[in-house]
Image: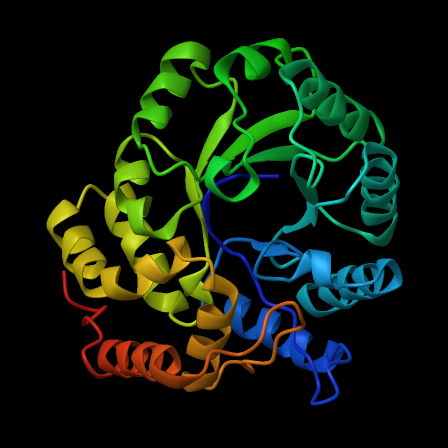
Amino acid sequence: MHWLGVFPAATTQFRQDLSIDLEATQGVLDALVRDGVHGLVVLGTCGENNSLEPDEKLSVIAAACEAVAKRVPIVVGVSELTTPRAAAFARNAERIGADALMVLPAMVYVPKPHELEAHFRHVAAASSLPIMLYNNPTAYRVNITIDVLARLTDVETIVAVKESAADTRRFTDLHNAFGDRFTLMAGLDDVALEALMLGAAGWVSGLTSAFPRESVALLQAVQGGNFPRALRIYRWFMPLLHLDADHDLVQSIKLAEQVMQRGSERVRAPRYPLEGARRAEVIAMVQAAASSRPELSAP
């Protein structure tokens, strides 16, 4: 497992009756791989993990493994209400063929630090897969502090952190605290360039689902030291990247996919597709980006 490159937070596709469209979901994943992404996160926030039934989640993992066929690693989101459910899901993900796990704190409950540590330890013990912890204090009201991470350094399978705090100082603080013990991944789209320049090895991205080639080009420019090129792509991308920080990010990203003919905007309740002025605004933003795409062959 190499935590390096662009890992889209892929969407789960639905039919008109909102049943899972496994074939369309496989099509989305296959298209992203063919466009050059380095890995895939399935059943994350954009995959609407918590809107799926347990058997549906397993069917999505199986369909993803079949479609991707080991061309890139598949990271499966573990987002459950209880620690035992999260551990059981981790075991099933490994059995089906996932390459790694993205483990979130238990949903709804806001844990104390020792409870958060225990949750991650229990899930890690349930499988042999490498684990990326997902820190998103804005969305989940839980901060995986440096103290908690320090107590988890003995868990060999916890190897990476997806950092979605808006404060980019976290990347430097984590590096100073742990060196290369944890691979750091950018997790919030509209500070992705800052994170990559501060040492993140890769980018778990939402808007990559609509513009994968530009996302890969941005990361490659940073890795190659071509910061003027990276900045040019980033400035073009930024209006869309801001969508990732909004509460309706899933609807916005799926609508962007639809505009770019890469997927459908259908979502499951409690989410509903964007409407009115907000829908028109997002469509206009995507169309403006599509009509002014940066020349990727230029230096």
- Residue at x 54% of width, y 57% of height: 9
Q: Position of residue 283 (x, y in %)?
A: 34, 82
- Residue at x 60% of width, y 35% of height: 132
With 293 as the anchor, is 153 left or right in this view?
A: right
Q: Is residue 174 above or below residue 124?
A: above
Q: Position of residue 17 (x, y in %)?
A: 75, 87
Q: Is residue 223 above or below residue 256?
A: above
With 267 as the anchor, is 251 left or right in this view?
A: left
Q: Is residue 203 above or below residue 218?
A: above
Q: Residue furthest left?
A: 228
Q: Quadrant of the N terminus?
A: top right
Relative to the observer, which residue lies in front, 107 or 101?
107
Give the quarter of the image for residue 91: top right
Q: Quadrant of the C terminus?
A: bottom left
Q: Is residue 276 above or below residue 133?
A: below
Give the quarter of the image for residue 175: top left
Q: Position of residue 284 (x, y in %)?
A: 28, 82
